[in-house]
Amino acid sequence: MENHRNDGGSKLGMWLFLLSEILLFGGLFILYSVYRFQNPQIFHLAAEALNRPLGVLNTLVLLTSSLTMALSIFFLKKGSPGRSLLFLASTLFLGILFLFNKYLEWTWKVQLGIYPDAPRLLERERGEVLFYGLYYSMTGLHGLHVLVGLGILSVMLFFILKNKINHNHSVPLENTGLYWHLVDIVWIFLFPLFYLIT
Amino acid sequence: MTPEGCGLKTYILVWLGLVVLTGVAVSVAGMDLAGWSTAVALIIAFLKSGLILLYFMHLREGGELRFLRWMIPGVLAILFLFTGLTFLDVAFR
């Protein structure tokens, strides 16, 4: 079936969406900086209680998934869908690994009685309540983006298998890549703000 | 190589750069830089984002969407403006 495509338009649309995503997370980053400004000492202590090695591991996982994503697009455009699929599947795997680590991290915190509105958390100082509120909402919103990304990656995997996207029509995979890289960039800022600055 | 895509080597080098910068960020966080640790961490985060935007997201190459290169700084400027305005309120309350 012949259909009319506008590759430039698709990409422009994706970029506009991504710019709005920057502002969405940006609002939360402003909130973080204000609360941090008001409670510097408590944010400092609370950040030390987060699992830094797991944060570093997740950073490396997501950075590597960005590489495999870029390589998947590279090979699809070069006309080798086999390798493209291999790297796309690796990206999918790394995304799942990221969420699994996040699951472990959250579970440990919940077991300690630290989760939004938890009685044991509410007994602590206001700054700490704010810190964990931000921690759960910001890493949660980011995790949701990773989850959505995994869904889109799976659809792309199916499309390549069905030859619906190939070296002649690679824009859907390229746009998926743009989204995935932006999710990586958001983590690049979340990681130092929550795990490193102590 | 096609003009619209960079080579395999570039991608791997960019990834290595990102990993090295993460290492630098983690080791710098262990040092006592007084009030500078936040600034250093953010500068490293901006450098990493720049690498991803320019190479993985192909902003370096231009093409028909060359103007997008200026939209990222534009959005960041809006964000900084709002951060600044917020702090004008919060800091002097």
Image (cartoon, coloured by chain):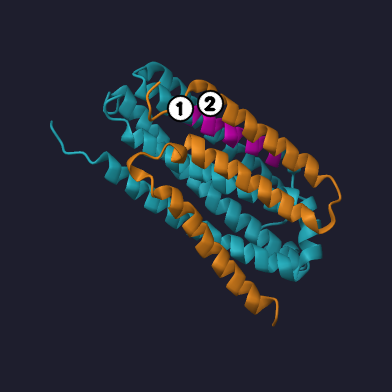
Chain colours: A cyan, B orange
Amino acid beneath label 1: Cys
B48 sits to left or right of B54:
right
Amino acid beneath label 2: Thr
Which span of residues is magenta-colored? A55-69
Under tag 2, what secondary structure? helix
Q: Position of residue B73 (x, y in %)?
A: 50, 55
Residue A95 in sight in this render: yes
Q: At 58% from the left edge and 31% from the top edge, which residue is drawn?
A: B14
- Asked if the residue under mark 1 is in contact with the one under mark 2, i.e. CB atoms within 8 Å, the reply is yes
- Residue A13 painted magenta: no
> In the displayed structure, would residue B20 be above or below residue A84?
below
A121 sits to left or right of A100:
right
> In the displayed structure, would residue B16 be above or below residue A100?
above
Q: Are the residues flagged by discs 2 and 1 from a single subunit? A: yes
Q: Position of residue A22 (x, y in %)?
A: 49, 55
Of all residues shown, which one is farthest toward the bottom? B93
Quadrant hosting residue B85: bottom right
Residue closest to the eye, B41 or A184: B41
Q: At 40% from the left edge and 33% from the top edge, which residue is drawn?
A: A154
Residue, disc 2: B10
The crowd level at tag 2 (other Cα within 10 Å; few <14, some 14-19, many 20+) is few
